[in-house]
Amino acid sequence: MITAQLSTHHRYESLVPGLAQAFAWLNEIKDNPPGPGRYEIDGERVFAIVSVYTTAPRVEKILEGHYNYLDVQYLASGGPEAIYYTPAEMASTLEEYDPEKDFITYEPDAADSMLVLHQGDFAVFFPEDAHMPGAAFDQPAAVTKIVVKVRLPEARG
């Protein structure tokens, strides 16, 4: 997992093919984010999902993971937003992996660490990072969140 301000993206963009495209797109739209929806950056290899919502108590959130994509979660506006996380290998599976959605859920109590995203912050979650986004920090907050999905070279299918 990586967390930083978007202004420091250059330090990380060479780690995985497609990550530079993800950061370039975020930099292009950061001052005027598009409305909610899905946006293709490089077909199914790199795409973004823009969401507008209010953060909620941790007990209402899901601990999730992905096998084939990493998540670049960027807080475009509002917040703060808490994201709980833990190594996926330390979490018990709640619902089995769905290859169509590249989505697995874990028992929520496993998430024993927390990071806080403020406007302009991003976090990168790899397949080994089970994560629980969308949680309220001190109190519920309205956010515009952009998740850029980057397909990993070693994807399973």
Image: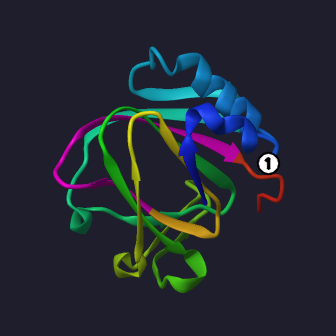
Which amino acid, by three-letter code, is at mark 1? Val
Task: Name the spot of residue 47 as percent of width and height, x first.
Answer: 62, 34
| In this rendering, position of residue 14 left or right of residue 115 | right
Numbered circles on residues, count: 1
| In this rendering, position of residue 60 left or right of residue 5 | left
Q: Residue at x 39, y 79 (%)?
A: 107
Quadrant of image for the N terminus: bottom right
Q: Residues within 10 Å of mark 1 (few under 14, many from 20)?
A: few
- In the image, farthest residue toward the top: 32
**In the picture, residue 106 is in which quadrant?**
bottom left
State whether the magenta stretch is mostly helix, strand or loop. strand
Task: Name the spot of residue 129 as percent of width and height, x first.
Answer: 58, 67
Q: Is residue 147 found inside the magenta-colored segment of the image? A: yes
Q: Residue at x 58, y 27 (%)?
A: 26
Vertical comparison of 155 with 25: above or below: below
Task: Name the spot of residue 96 as percent of width and height, x first.
Answer: 51, 75
Quadrant of image for the C terminus: bottom right
Vertical comparison of 65 with 39: above or below: below
Q: Residue at x 48, y 85 (%)?
A: 92
Asked if residue 44 can be seen in this view, the reply is no
Q: Magenta part of the protein: which range?
A: 132-150
Q: Is residue 136 found inside the magenta-colored segment of the image? A: yes
**In the picture, residue 18 is in which quadrant?**
top right
Which residue lies under the disc numbered 1?
Answer: 16
